[in-house]
Amino acid sequence: MTTAHHGALQLKVERIEAVTPEINRYTLTASDGSWLPPFSGGSHVTVLIDTETGTRRNAYSLMSSPYDASQYQIAVRRVEDGKGGSVAMHGRVHEGDVVPVTIPANLFPLSKHARHHVFIAGGVGVTPIFAQLEELSMKNGSFEVHLAVRGPEHATLGRELRERYGDRVSVYGDEDATRLDIAAVLADRPLGTHVYVCGPARMIDDVIDQAHRQGWTDANIHFERFEDAGSTGEPFTVTLAKSGATIEVSPDQSLLEAVEESGFKLPYLCRGGACGECETEVLELDGTLDHRDDWLSERDRASNAIIMPCVSRASCTRLVINA
Amino acid sequence: MTPTAEPTAFTTDETYTPEGAYTFRNSREGVRRLPFPFPDDEYMYSMNLEPHVPAGDGAMRAAFDIDEHYISECHHRAQMLEAMPGVHYLALPHMMEAQWDLLELIFESYARDYPEHFTLTKTGNEWHWQNRLLGIDDTFTFGDPTTLPLEPMEYATRQAQGEFVVLEERDNDLVIGAGMTTQRADYSLRFNLGMRFFEFHGPVPKLHEMGILDRALKFLLRMKPGHPVRRVNWSLTVNPRLETSVETLPEWAPDRATVDAENAGERVYLRIELQPLHRLPRSNAIVFPVRTYLVSLAELVEHAPDWAKRIHRALASLDPELVDYKGFHRYHAAAVAWLAQHDDGAPLATGYPWAEGGIQPGD
Amino acid sequence: MLITGIKSRPVYDRLAPMASGLRHLAIAQGSGGQPMLRLLADMTPAQRGVATVVYSSESFTGNSYEAELRAVDGIDLRLCASNVEALQVLDDLLSTAKMGTRLYLAGSEGFIGTAMQRATEYGLDRDEILREHAGSFVRRVWCAHCNAYTENVTQRIFRCPGCGLDLVVRDHYSSRLAAFQGVKADGEVPGELPEIEELDT
């Protein structure tokens, strides 16, 4: 197995393919030809992207087969008004380059107890489903996919899935301009059905809302928010208790990014406020915390004693964290 | 410490059963490489978890230790599985992913740590596995159970020393989903399958009250692939019998009544359990291997006199509740009396033998 | 209510309508009729209109709530003479049930445990089910030596009808088998039995 250097794998960009006007698919292999760490369907890696304004850490779902340890594949949608990571992936990364990539982690795993799996995705949100279907089809699991796209030129990935899995895959918004009806997709499902949604925030919220209306409980609803959860805002200052360092967090970066840019380390996994890995103790606060994560309970938030630096911010004159 | 060990002389026909006349024996080297589990004169129950990193050239050198008994133990496993089908190996249907994970972990570890005995070659997901100790040479498609003669976990663990329990993570808890347990100590896999963490630890005294289990569960749930941890545990047993399940209790429990202060040295065996826990990458399951070592009290005295002194003191001061739970109240006094003859009371080093400055076997 | 130190025994709930459900499936046995009647009384008429109730009048204590259940208006009631029959009806209902169904179980530990096994097979999650124990805490016991199950065990030591061994009932419960564990009581010295005692039924 290839070894991690400073916690990151050094992977070679073997191939870059344009799959839609906005999305490139990257095939990555170990730069020394060894085996890559195994992963499960739904996993993501964080790519450390070198941009003109510093290193960006973007999370991308793995879309290659979990049974093939020789390569990873990710799809990157170019976001013009983002922080520059995806633009650099499209513009600055070339075949043959070596990029640092973290070991895979899975915050969107398949339920092992489902009797039927229903996937709902929008656009590039289809990527984790590729690996999940590889896993399910090897196990003869029962599944279906509902993918909404913005027109035929964006339907390439959906068509690939249709070629592999036939009628179990429905693509909406390709040539026939059909529309995805979430309520109808979820209606009258047998017991033990699980739904997975990956796409824009509005699609995720719709699926959760419709499933609740139809009496589904949260244990059967799975989602991954792949877009930026919104970690930008007013600038503030943070002090790291262990080193005494004082760091300015600018409007366009998260607390976690600012700390990293200053050469310090915090634990992280999802960088989207979901996994709990970066949970950090607040030692002093003169002001208010702006919690933006999905991790902390209401009680945790009210305590003002914990913060998730990957997404949350503060409006304060003084903030000291236990880092 | 050197990373390579002396070549092991494998015994091939030892038995662990009364029918086979219990021919199991340890060599001197075999005793002195054991993961001896008593760091102090007084034994304290604890979770004693530590990172599972290679240490020394004994049982802690490899990710999954094999020793001179490897071939005999694999034969014993095959016999037990044949004698009682559906009792010693079980896997719930949703554990197939974890089964592949476990096969991969064992085979990759064996091939890396014992290249002279095992070779694993991958071409995409076409795998070629060679086990020269058991004379196995197979190719199969990783992830496709139809290409193996047995389920992946059974296939792999029939070629591995120790038992393996796989825990599925569900709702922030760990649930027993599969097991290869031909060596289990007084429990039933059929009964325990599907149990949650607190349920299967239910019968262990004091754990709940001490809050040990809460902390252990939280710790295990935070485990990540590539960062295994280990602990050692121990018990006593009568005769070198590996299979002491609840199911066969009528066969082995009467042995407990045959021990006296004269024969305890030969009859009573220390049963050491080395448990290297790993998070599995695809299934997110945790494998709980129990690598069991048997050594008689007499073998300890002969080959590892300082360890014999240490176990004498640890047993003599053991909490009666633990004596009951571990099931040797009937011969505890006899074992202590026999060991007392070989303990001069000299001070002993503290710490595990694989740790720096820890207790060594003695000469 | 049984509170013991047995860590593996299920913790039971009190039945109450689960408002998030679109359909309600309730199954009870013997004394479980009582919590079932209370549950139905707590439901709105609309909830009762989408409720199916399965009741088995088989009982260890002899309590039957069949007449009272018949008197409840507006429910789909299926009466069964035995627990086996009731569990078969449950199985049939689960096989066609849809997401949004809530399941309510009431009765003896063995009955609830067996019904839970069916529910789990159909993929129902713990947060879609409520279970309330009713009646005597007699135990269902699995023999580790011959695989036989014995219902309604009340003594710590009993003779296994499967293999004839005297078994001691351990305070250890398996949800998968829906039973306590029985092992040979005089394992170490034949004939030397532990003290006979009433189980905490």
Image: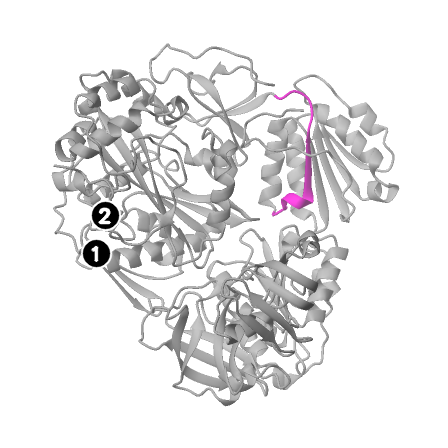
B285 sits to left or right of A286: left
Mark 1 = which residue? B114
The lab-note entry on whether marks 1 and 2 share a chain reads: yes
Taking the magenta stretch, the answer to whether it contains residue C130 is: yes
Q: Secondary structure at mark 2?
A: loop
Q: Which mark is residue B210?
A: none
Taking the magenta stretch, the answer to whether it contains residue B69 is: no
Tell me residue C123's x, y (percent): 60, 48
The chain letter for the residue carrying disc 2 is: B
Q: Quadrant of the N terminus of chain A?
A: bottom left
Mark 1 closeness class: few <14, some 14–19, many ≥20 residues within 10 Å: some
Residue A25, compared with residue B122, is above or below; it is below
Residue bounds of the magenta highlight = C123-137
Q: Is residue B194 at all visible to an observer of this figure? A: no
Q: Is residue B153 at all visible to an observer of this figure? A: yes
Task: Identify the amino acid type marked 2.
Answer: Ile
- Name the residue nearer the viewer: A84 or B126: A84
Dot placed on the residue nearer the N-terminal end, 1 or 2: 2
Tell me residue A291's x, y (percent): 68, 63
Contact check, label 1 and label 2, Cβ < 8 Å = yes
Determine which quarter of the picture holds residue A7. bottom left
